[in-house]
Image (cartoon, helix red, strand yellow):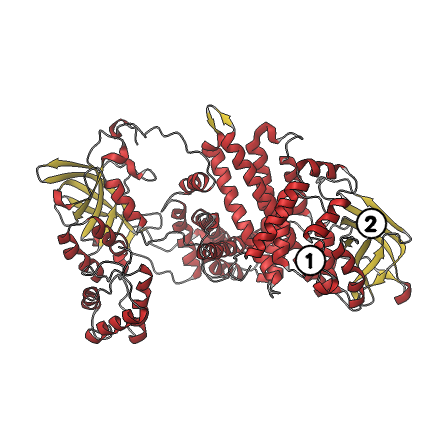
Amino acid sequence: MALDFGFTDEHDELRATVRAFLEDKSDEVAVREHMASERGFDPALWAQMAEQIGLAGLIVPEEYGGAGMGFVEVLVVMEEMGRALACAPFLSTGVFAPTLLQHCADEAARKELLAGIAAGRTRVAVAYAEPNGRWDAAGITLAAEGSDADLTLTGTKTYVLDGHTADVLLVVARDGDGLGVFRVDAGARGLTRTALPELDLTRKLARVDFAKTPATRVHPGDQTAAFERVLALVAAALAAEQVGGAQKCLDMAVEYAKTRLQFGRPIGSYQGIKHKCADMLVAVEFAKSAAYNACLAAAEGDADLVENASMAKAYCSKAYFHAAADNIQIHGGMGFTWEHPAHLYFKRAKASELLFGDAPYHREIVAREVGI
Amino acid sequence: MSGSRQMSEEELRRRTRALLDEVHPETTDAIPFRRKQFEHGLAWVHFPEGHGGLGLSPKMNVVVQDEISKHSKVVHHDPGASIIGIGMGAPVVLTYGTEEMKRDLLPRIFSGEDIWCQMFSEPSAGSDVAGLATRAERDGDEWVVNGQKVWTTVAHLARWGMLLARTNPDVPKHDGLSYFLLDMHAPGVEVRPLYQITGEAEFNEVFFTDVRIPHDRMLGKEGQGWRVAITTLMNERVAIGGGGSSRKGGGGIAQLLKLWKDRAEGAFSPSQEAMLRDRVTQSWIENELLRVTSQRARAAQKAGNPGPEGSVSKLAQAEINKRMWEIGIDVMGPTGLTFEAGYELRQGFSALDTTEELAKYQFLRSRANSIEGGTSEIMRNILGERVLGLPGEPRVDKDVAWKDVPRS
């Protein structure tokens, strides 16, 4: 995607490949199977995603065995994943962790982890939010104890994406240098990981408790600014996923409105339904603009990334939620059943709205960046 | 009308310089200059030779403009009041007019000597313009017109009007319309300013009382008025809802931000302040996404696969604009209670010197955004039916004689 928002043939090809793969291997039956498991995904399927279509290493630089792609490719994949409600550790291991390693880790740490991520061997989760419920870097209070060779962590991180299943945790915490990233391996002493009972069953979060757990700082120095940029990048990626979900809800609603007959005609011929669909269309197109704009800023390293990413997360969160809610309404009683997939999108929409900061949180960032 | 003829850009530039050698905008007034421009075929190059054009592609028009502005500090642009004549009148005369009409009318449209207006909308025919009721009845070689039009831009200045009238009430609505060229100076034509909620009159009402039009001023055949009108509308250059500012933070949102920054200190409690700030931010985001959506639409158009991003702008912009100016008033606090003194019933625009005055004016003017050029309800129907493919509503007036259709 160049500056003028056109996708290239390669992007279209990537989209077609991911869509075909997910239609084949991650249909609704598969999604319901994964969401019923505590792990939340199928390791064999993740291995296939890594090996067959290279998703695990999508943005891992080529020198570490990845595809070396950027955020436009992340956008394309996230849109498709959101559309399919795919249950896979792509956002955690495929996007968040490699982005954090790129921005806040030194060469040694990258070398240790990125090749494993790209190969689909190592799953890495990022633990940063705490029970205080804050999503900003300043809200992080967990502090490391001890000195260089003998660092430990004691405290709690929560809402950790795929935190209970990851092989490695990258914990964002403080020490004398300021904010930093600390590596903790799955088998470490004093580490307790608990899957959270969740609204959205299709994406798993965990609470992680540390009790004098050994940790290694992956890079010296205060990483606050770099980490804030990482948060913006992850918000942009999540916004893209929301676009995919919102588009799918619109497609489902329109399809149903064309075929469902009441009072002798398709319900989509009534303005009460038609106008709802038209408003969804406007919101979905605007959401695309927001997410594309943010991922473009991410891909090109723009100075206004933070503003654009927060704009996208704020707008796409609401657009997805409204599309998912209206999709239930348009499906009527059918849309309220467990059997129909409408509630899966509704729950994913609300959960992804809250994850990494809701719309008012991100509008606050936009206001600050723009100077409102 | 679209160019089949080939001419190099260099040749067109040479011809433009030849025009400038003969008459120069810096030393010639607009009307005589534009008359000469017409004679040289440089008025609208996509028109045929002899009618102000050279039979080229419409894309070549910018070449003429470019060459003129390269060689002259003064440029005689299309006069503002001529926009309807140039954008809609000229194409319809070219397509449906007699040779005599083309010869007489086209040069005067382009020169700006004749202002044109378009008379389609009526008090009882807004969104459903094909249901209009102005009657034209045949009397020998003439038609006698009675009725009323509304929202007629520049009617008070117009020499000619494009009139859509009902010539047969006994057939379904689209089939009973005919299209006339009306002499606005004819007896029985009365133009009155139409005052709107801003207090000014941008538009007019036009009343017809036994107005006589010679039969040969009918454009197209009797009963084909709707088709002719569609041609006119397709040529409409007046784009309403072009997709917002092309510059980040430009246009109305810049004014809103200024109002926000200039707000009176202590006028709001901290919680009111927080709510207002969030609304201003939401408006910023909406305006920014409107701009980006237009950018996407242009990119898709250029790539040859326009998608829905191009269709949503009219609806979105109307609603965004209305919300934005509501916030503008709210940000002013009690100052929003006051308004420019004596703003009622004036023809012509008020001078809007301050951001506050502009915002107050726009607060009123923006209400029209979701009505003019297709109401938001009609736009939602269009998006629902043409973009999403939802079925239309059953039409109760489709196969019924116009006279038997209930109307307000």
**Residue drawn at 70 percent across, 38 percent down:** A30
Say if mark 2 contacts mark 1, CB within 8 Å.
no
The chain letter under disc 1 is: A
**Which corner quadrant holds the N terminus of chain A?**
bottom right
Q: Are marks 2 and 1 on the same chain?
A: yes
List x then y, in percent, for residue B300.
47, 54
**Which corner quadrant holds the C terminus of chain A?**
bottom right
As drawn, is B213 to the left or to the right of A255? Answer: left
Using the image as rendered, state which of residue B221 and residue A304 is in the foreground.
B221
10 Å crowding of disc 2: few (<14), some (14-19), many (20+): many
**Residue drawn at 56 percent across, 57 percent down:** A293
Residue under label 2, please give it.
Answer: A208
Distance in Å between CA atoms under marks 2 and 1:
20 Å
**Residue drawn at 59 percent across, 38 percent down:** A325
Under mark 1, the amino acid is Leu
Using the image as rendered, state which of residue A304 and residue B191 is in the foreground.
A304
Using the image as rendered, state which of residue B68 and residue B351 is in the foreground.
B68
The dot on residue A231 is: 1
Q: Residue furthest top?
A: A263
As drawn, is A22 to the left or to the right of A190? Answer: left
Point out the tag, 2 or 1, that comes first from the N-terminus.
2
The answer to whether one can see residue A270 in this image is: no
The chain letter under disc 2 is: A
Using the image as rendered, state which of residue B120 and residue B177 is in the foreground.
B177
10 Å crowding of disc 1: few (<14), some (14-19), many (20+): many
List x then y, in percent, for residue B19.
22, 72
Q: Residue furthest left?
A: B140
Q: Is A325 drawn above or below residue B362 in the view shown?
A: above
